[in-house]
Image (cartoon, helix red, strand yellow):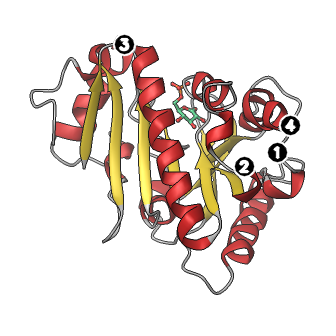
Amino acid sequence: MKINVFKSADEVLSGLAEYFVETANQSIKGKGKFSVALSGGSSPKKLYELLASDAFKNRVDWNHVYFFFGDERNVPHTHADSNYLMAKTALFAPLNIQESHVFPVDTALSPEAAAEKYTQEILAFFGSEDLRFDLVLLGLGDNSHTASLFPYTPVLHDKTASVKSVFLQDQQVFRITLTAPLINKAFNIAYLVYGEGKAIAVHHIIEDEEDIDNYPAQLIIPEEGGDLQWFLDEPAASELSHKSA
Ligand SMILES: O=C1O[C@H](COP(=O)(O)O)[C@@H](O)[C@H](O)[C@H]1O
């Protein structure tokens, strides 16, 4: 695991954009394509805008990039909470990404059916290749969730590399998420976390004893040969006793 700490949120975003470009170009050079599972929520929007900006847009051959989602809210693709809509607005539309390279979760179905369909789509995409995304981008909630792996939900104990629906009792909503075993197969996993509000969660995940039900992001441990990197700003790293690992 590598922990990259930057002075400001802008510097974290640039650091992760550089890492994205490097990882994408390595994959494209090696096997002609790059598969990435995007994170949702509020933090990554600025990253996607940066990747689509003049500073970065010509540094990757986007014709070889395939986009998936690490998690999705159970809402239509036109809904303000949709992770797909956020990525479409910030990244796919500005870069003119071809529709066949974007794999949204089919939220028109029931959450269970959407999760099963997404599992099948991912399996079909990888075919006979290893079921390993080249990059999974993750965020961290202040309650220590990542993707939609929320505290005390049954999906935390799912051992299959697949996609599952999750019911959040407190919000009375469903979400759809990659399971931890599927995320952990990725060649590269990168967390983007900035802001003081995340500092305690960052400390729990990186430095506390294992307590998966309370701190689900502790489940993210790449399989052999995988790389895990954290991209933090100083406020998010402020509760860490060791700033690098
Ligand atoms: O709900 C979600 O939360 C996490 C963190 O999101 P943020 O809004 O605090 O940046 C995110 O990683 C996940 O994909 C998202 O659906």
Between label 1 and label 4, give the one nearer the viewer.
Answer: 1
Between label 2 and label 4, give the one nearer the viewer.
Answer: 2
Q: Which residue in the structure is indicated by mark 4?
A: 77
Quick check: marks 1 and 4 in contact, CB under 8 Å? no
Q: Residue furthest bottom?
A: 128
Q: Which residue in the structure is indicated by mark 2?
A: 62
Q: Quick one: label 1 or label 2, which is nearer the N terminus?
A: 2
Between label 3 and label 2, give the one nearer the viewer.
Answer: 2
Foreground residue, 70 or 214? Answer: 70
Quick check: 46 above or below 165? above
Q: Residues within 10 Å of mark 1 (few under 14, many from 20)?
A: some
Residue type of the residue flagged with mark 1? Ile
Q: Residue furthest left?
A: 241
In three-dimensional space, the C-alpha distance between marks 3 and 4, rounded to whole angstroms, equals 32 Å
Q: Report x, y in % for residue 181.
A: 45, 65
Residue type of the residue flagged with mark 3? Ser
Ligand 1 resides in the quarter of the picture at top right
Foreground residue, 41 or 35? Answer: 35
Q: Image quadrant for the C terminus?
A: top left
Q: Report x, y in % for residue 77.
A: 86, 37
Between label 1 and label 2, give the one nearer the viewer.
Answer: 2
Q: Report x, y in % for residue 233.
A: 33, 20
Q: Report x, y in % for residue 223.
A: 34, 68
Using residue 93 as the reference point, say whether residue 4 is left or right of it.
left
Residue type of the residue flagged with mark 4? His
Name the residue at 74% across, 76% down: 124
Q: Which residue in the structure is indicated by mark 1?
A: 97
Q: Quick one: label 3 or label 4, which is nearer the N terminus?
A: 3
Using residue 222 as the reference point, say whether residue 53 is left or right of it.
right
